[in-house]
Image (spheres, helix red, strand yellow):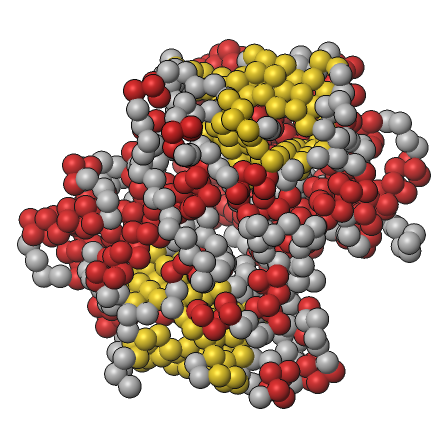
Amino acid sequence: MSALLEVRNLKKYFKTGGAWLHAVDGINFTLNEGKTLGVVGESGCGKTTLGRVILHLLEPTDGQVIFDGKDWTNPKKTELAKMREEMQIIFQDPYASLNPRMSVSEIIMEPLILQGKLSKAQIREETVRLMDTVGLAVRFGNAYPHELDGGRRQRIGVARALALNPKFIVCDEPVSALDVSIQAQIINLLLDLQEEYGLAYMFVTHDLSVVNYISDDIMVMYLGQAVEKAPAEELFDRPLHPYTKALLSAIPIPDIHNQTKRIIMQGEITSPINPKPGCRFMDRCQYISPECANPQTLEEPSPNHFVACCRSNIINT
Amino acid sequence: MNETVSWRKKSRFAETWRQLKKNKVAVICLFVIIAVVLIAIFAPVIAPYSYEKQDYSSVYAPPSAEHLLGTDGLGRDILSRLIYGAGQSLQLGVISTAIASVIGIIIGSIAGYYGGWKDNLIMRFFDIYQSIPMFLLCVTLAAVMGPSLNNATLAIGIGMIPGPARMMRASILSIREMDYVESAKAINAHSSHIIRKYIVPNAIAPLIVYVTMSIGMNVLAGAALSFIGLGAQPPVPEWGAMVSDARNIMRDHGTLALYPGICIMIVVLAFNLLGDGLRDALDPRLKN
Amino acid sequence: MTDILLEISDLVIEYHTDDAVIHALNGINLTIKQGETIGLVGETGAGKTTIARSIMRILQTPPAKFCSGKIVFQDQDIMALSEKEMRKIRGNKIAMIFQDPMTALNPVHRIGDQITEAVGLHNHVSRAEAQIRAGKMLEMVGIPASRFKEYPHQFSGGMKQRVVIAMALACNPILLLADEPTTALDVTIQAQVLEMMRELKERLGTSVVMITHDLGIVAQTCNSVAVIYAGEIVEYGTAEHIFDYPSHPYTIGLFNSLPKLGSRERRLKPIKGLMPDPTNLPTGCKFYDRCPDATKACSLCSPDIIEISPGHSVKCIMREVSS
């Protein structure tokens, strides 16, 4: 099976003052049709920026985005229109990502109107179908987003993303602003849609239990770089990178008899401004050695399991 | 499935009115303003006398059935002059605000949306502009252009540009960063669509409030210009000019200054309180 | 009983807005024992924060309206105290940590001064002494005393929350109300802060009310748990009881809607529907609409809270019948 999306050495630097912030620093991955890549990391690790750069909402500094065999790194205007139909995004905060001055039906219709391929009546019909698909009663068409609860608002966001029939959707923390019981409703909806339309997701989140549940592969990011990438089960069963280990152990588990010993990391995440060439996790790592100051590369110690740690062999034996 | 697909959009106007109705003070103010506008329009019909009809037989007459508010030093009916004056004062307030808002909004939008050197240039220019006392600027402009009502209106309009411009720029800057603007880019919306459907509707609410309030402010500024003789020219009555006319005889006939003064106060207050009410009514988050 | 620190009985609180009455708390009964950590679990709008704010008596009135009930803290009815007497308790014997550390600190004051002020407010000590204590507090929460003179913006989110905790603990409170103390933090930082809170609690013997929506945090930190739904406690018990034998359909639903680490079933089991509108609560069981086991009787009257085993009570008519 050929990859639907291939990201090669993607970089996004921001200029802050006189320095460069390496928000995304050399990310590689491939994603197949109908699959989900979970991208996990703490705030400031560049996971949100990564999604924006892939969708070309931000210009990449370097690297390539290849979708369905086409290089869409720097799309022309006509290509961009096509690209927006194929790749969509669901935002984190359903309170901030919906225009408060538009009604629900207007929000869902808008992409279709801008696309300009359907007649007015067809757009209406399609909007009704979309609302039905995401489980929004048609009577809410007239309502404004602020009149609805968080779960329904997020359904509006999902419907809008689906409107153009994309093949790939970046889900940028789509459930982290929602309550647990509503969270489960939205996750189920996303899974149903994936099954029905064969969607590929890039699921960006800091919530590890959610990402484990929804993803096929998981990529762990730290300060703009991927430190580990593996199939979901493999990653949770056999994490290799010290950061992944600490991250996994930090998740509070809702099970009273199974409280494992937590790895309490020292210090806090810094920001990748003019980073040194070595391992970016070095300062917080308990296994530090002089080689860590050299640039780290992603190695593949077992099939499909990649880790960027020069000491992973020593740590994990 | 196709039960009742009749998405008729609640009009923004109806929605705002529904919210505004809850605020009794604002509604009263709105009616006061409508009344003043009607009085200004129908002044020739309503006013018992012409504003310039002089009657030397009754100079400084006290209120009577004939002259409800008395007469001034030339025997002109005060009430009639107040009624005619409404139009002049409103013109000063409304048209000058319109001039300031249109120019200000355009300049502010350019600064806010494009940013960079354009923003810098415009903003530094306004910094200099606003370091000149506003009223002094209006006075200078009005004096240069020559004393007349229209010139005073224009002078105030030009003097007031930085207010709405800065306001527009600030709202655009904050709206540009919102997720929903990004979501519009994600569906391949053009700049013009984003400005029309996203930025303007969201930026307009605070502007409406600001503009409403600045009408009051500009009525006051216009009255002040007229007071120093740079606004409406005699014999055309204007409230500020009427106060000015009355200042020499204030000791003996204080009411001559009082009546136009009260009129100015009522109109300014009405616009300010209406602006306050609109602020609440236009906030979509407060609706329920 | 001497080991009861705080007892809330029949607390009813409403919020009055222009055109509606929000029934925030509808008869809360809760006891907090000396030295325990009790978790208040529930979704947004369930009334968790209102409980904490009424214990602190920092609810804005209006719109909040205290309708009935009692909050007895160390034999004093908090609701009956004068504001002056309350000030002696607030921040001194009972302290609160808020969700957002960014807004809890004054950006224009040095953090050391802010802690010193908190110490000085309730203790008659000299400024120098208060400063020494403040420095100790900082070190206790894992911040070197050398950062005493820095401003809040020089600290990261996790560090700020540590400062907030240091301030809350500055007067050795007997009861600490923690309102989602780690929700704004990343998991690894959350782990640090929770670990630190656990250590401090052990050392100082403080009772803690942990308000959270995260059952994982409850499992990790709490001795007992109260599950709150639409302004009522629907289930109360020791953490073991609640996690091993969740008995209210809502509690069961909450557990089911969590994605479990390790298990990879293809569907989560969410609770259907939404929490009822707090301005228009149903007469019967508040969970009736969403409950998979609902019967006709459930819609008619609100069930009593019944002890189904020692120390474990449930507000559900089905358990009433079976016990």
Q: In the picture, residue C322 is in which quadrant?
A: bottom right
How many numbered marks, from 0 up? 0
Q: Nearer the viewer, residue B209 or B71?
A: B209
Q: Nearer the viewer, residue C80 or C76?
A: C76
Q: Quadrant of the N terminus of chain A?
A: top right
Q: Residue drawn at (62%, 46%), measured in percent from left and top?
A: A213
Task: Judge whether residue A212 can be spotted in this image.
Answer: yes
Q: Residue drawn at (52%, 84%), measured in percent from left and top?
A: C308
Q: Is residue A86 above or below residue A197?
A: above
Q: Residue drawn at (38%, 78%), measured in percent from left and top?
A: C31
Q: Is residue C116 above or below residue B233?
A: below
Q: Nearer the viewer, residue A102 or A277?
A: A277
Q: In the picture, residue B131 is in which quadrant?
A: top left
**Horizontal and vertical percent position of residue B180:** 64, 35
Q: Quadrant of the C terminus of chain A?
A: top left
Q: Is residue C249 above or below residue A314?
A: below
**Horizontal and vertical percent position of residue C115:** 21, 49
**Horizontal and vertical percent position of residue A203:** 62, 37
Q: Would residue B189 appear left or right of C251 to someone viewing this image? A: right
Q: Would residue A99 appear left or right of C11 to someone viewing this image? A: right
Of all residues shown, which one is farthest toward the front? A317
**Horizontal and vertical percent position of residue A36:** 67, 36
Q: Residue drawn at (63%, 88%), measured in percent from left and top?
A: C321
Q: Is residue A12 above or below residue B29?
A: above
Task: Judge whether residue A145 can be spotted in this image.
Answer: no
Q: Nearer the viewer, residue C41 or A39?
A: A39
